[in-house]
Image: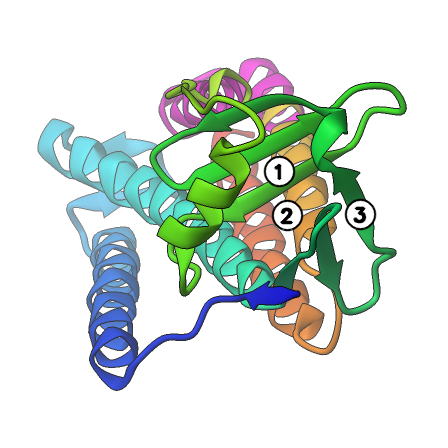
Amino acid sequence: MQEYRIEDDSSTIRGEAIGRLLSWGTVALLVVIAVLLFTTSRLDVSEGNLSLSGELLFVLSILGAIVGASVLICREALHLAARKLVFVVNGNGIVRKRLGYPDIRISFPEIETLSEGQRWLVIKSAEPRRTIAIPINVRGYDALRSELASHHPVEWQARFPWKSAALLSVSLLSWAIILWSQSVGTAIAASVIALIALASASYRLWKVLHGSRRWLLSVSIGIAWLIACLLICIRVVSLW
């Protein structure tokens, strides 16, 4: 019986910490730019008297901060969840273990598809349908892949995340309408759509993370909702 899990070395941990610092620093910088534009005379939101360059920069800063924070929160949730996974291979099949969740077992004869993408090796069984997704950065991935490939051929499948792309597009369009529209009714309608998209994204992220670090995601989602509601209120009041 062999166990596989993600085990980062010191150089990997240091690189990820630097990447997080730069990424969140960029988001924070965009927020600061938006706040400065909001409080200066170039962007008089209360009277709706906006210069074209100031308005454009304000909208791009807000959208960039929202999109950037959403992407980073999603990546952090997946990052934390992947490190709680343990994959056990024995003579009969593979078992995925995760604290707080029931084990998922797929025997080798039950494997229906074995597809490899850029970040995950996905195993799907026949009925009853079960799925095990293995991150490619687990220690001993090549040996694990070879073992599974000896029982079923591996297919390369780089799927485009259509659902995530559609949700992001709807969210971006809604926020662009909220920040750029001069009609109260249009801004309110776009706000409803934007909040629905935010609720859908929050729910999808909430399902990914489980356990002692779920509080981190809770705080992040709470901050995102607070910022979204605050921006909507400010914009609607300025147009009223």
Q: Nearer the viewer, residue 73 or 210?
A: 210
Q: Which mark is residue 205?
A: 2
The residue that disc 1 covers is 201
Mark 2–mark 1 Cα distance, whole angstroms, equals 6 Å
Q: Is residue 14 left or right of residue 182?
A: left
Which residue is outermost to the bottom?
Answer: 10
Determine whether label 3 and label 1 are within 8 Å by CB.
Answer: no
Secondary structure, mark 2, is helix
Q: Quadrant of residue 148?
A: top right
Is residue 180 magenta-colored?
A: yes
The residue that disc 3 covers is 104
Q: Nearer the viewer, residue 77 or 96?
A: 96
Where 37 sits versus 129, above or below? below
Camera-nearest label, 2 or 1: 2
Q: Amino acid at mark 3?
A: Ile
Q: Amino acid at mark 1?
A: Ala
Region of the chain picked out in magenta, as a range? 164-192
Instruction: Tell me if residue 234 can be seen.
Output: no
Which residue is depicted at the point 36% across and 23% down?
Answer: 180
Mark 3–mark 1 Cα distance, whole angstroms, equals 25 Å
Question: Where does residue 18 sit, x and y in percent of width and height?
Answer: 20, 74
Is residue 147 magenta-colored?
A: no
Q: Nearer the viewer, residue 106 or 28?
A: 106
Q: Which mark is residue 188?
A: none
Secondary structure, mark 3, is strand
Determine whether label 2 and label 3 are within 8 Å by CB.
Answer: no
Camera-nearest label, 2 or 3: 3
